[in-house]
Amino acid sequence: MSTWDDPDERARPSGFGGDWRGSRPVFDDPMSWSLPIMRVARISVRVHLFFLVFVVVLLTHAASVTSDGAVGVRPTLLGLAGLFLVVLLHEFGHCIACRMVGGTANEILLWPLGGLASCDPPERPRAHFWTAVGGPLVNVALIALLTPLLGLTSGDWWGYAIPDPRNLGGVVQSADFGEDLAGWGRMFLFFTNAIAWFLLLFNLLPMFPLDGGRILQAVLWKRMGYTRSMRTACRAGIIGAVLVGVTALVAESTMLLGIAIFSGFICVLTARHVEQQRDFLGFEPDPAELASMEEEVALETVVRRESTLRDAAKAAGEAEIDRILAKIARSGIESLTAPERQALQRATDERRGRG
């Protein structure tokens, strides 16, 4: 999952809860409660404090549960490492795709509900489409590498190489990964592959602001315009949030419930902002058209500025020639310095050329 822009500033959301990008933690902005951990390709990676709390809670629970159905500390630790890797690479995919279509992307935030990539693609449907697709393509690449590797080395495809979400814990308990370092590696690859599968399938749900919802909005944008496409994507997202929320209650999944609440809130907020923007302007704005208008205004400003500079330079040149001629009248041509002689010669050549 990734985000773009702030819903209070523009019609497409990013950095929800405030502009956390490059900001210092402040008490009244929960989205800024994060710590920088690395910087790769001019992209800063920050980890939210709630993510660290999430990790501590899971490891504490794994260490305290001693029933036969417990997964254990080692699988929990390796699963968290796989989750961190897949989410991080997924968000890097969004950032790289955004840059490839001419946008800017310079920060990633990891938090308990996934990742938030600070991406600002150009205001074009195609640019938004590829920015949204960039993350899932990373999952596809991971799956294309890990699934055949696990299947061919183990001979066990369904449930192991191709994970079964209903019995992931059972596979971990029944599989013989081994207790040595190589066993740790096999378990890590298993979790990384399974998480890549789950996040890919979940993120492709046509549920805004998940990647599937953003892809849907970008496809519809070209056909029905920005406002109608965003309104449709938000309605689909609200329906999806309700369905995911019900599933979370049945499955007793706190994370799914959090994603459902977050997604539903963003859909309602975004749809409301789109309607307010339409009511304020009196028409349904299209960011692509507004961006084109801004580019035209900027181009006209540059042309006027260049024309003004040329006129100023011409006036300054004429004033300099007048001063040189006045000096000749007073003191004779022999009184001119070398730069003054060169300026007079250039002015003479220009007049001859025009003549």
Image (cartoon, grey):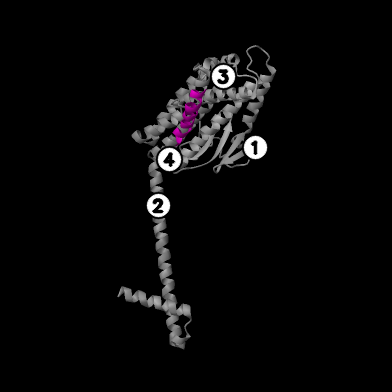
Q: Position of residue 313 (x, y in %)?
A: 43, 69
The residue beneath circle 4 is 280
Are discs 3 and 4 less than 8 Å apart at CB? no
Which quarter of the figure has residue 180? top right
Residue 140 in view of the camera: yes
Q: Report the mark closest to the observer, 1 or 3.
A: 3
The residue beneath circle 3 is 253
Q: Position of residue 228 (x, y in %)?
A: 38, 33
Q: Looking at numbered disc 4 in the image, what kind of residue is underneath it? A: Phe
Q: Main secondary structure of the magenta part?
A: helix
Q: Report the mark closest to the observer, 3 or 4.
A: 3
The residue beneath circle 2 is 297
Q: Residue furthest top?
A: 68
- Spatial CA distance of label 3 from label 4 is 41 Å
Q: Residue furthest front?
A: 153
Q: Nearer the viewer, residue 120 or 68?
A: 68
Q: Position of residue 143 (x, y in %)?
A: 49, 26
Residue 5 in view of the camera: no
- Spatial CA distance of label 1 from label 3 is 29 Å
Q: Quadrant of the C terminus?
A: bottom left
- Spatial CA distance of label 4 from label 1 is 33 Å
What residue do we see at 51% from left, 24% from top?
Answer: 149
Q: Earlier in the sequence, mark 1 or mark 3?
A: 1
Q: Residues within 10 Å of mark 4 (few under 14, many from 20)?
A: few
Q: Nearer the viewer, residue 88 or 21?
A: 88
Q: Earlier in the sequence, mark 2 or mark 3?
A: 3
Q: Secondary structure at mark 2?
A: helix
Are discs 4 and 1 less than 8 Å apart at CB? no
Q: Residues within 10 Å of mark 1 (few under 14, many from 20)?
A: few
Q: Earlier in the sequence, mark 2 or mark 1?
A: 1
Question: In the displayed structure, does residue 235 sit left or right of residue 34?
Answer: left
Q: Position of residue 192 (x, y in %)?
A: 55, 26
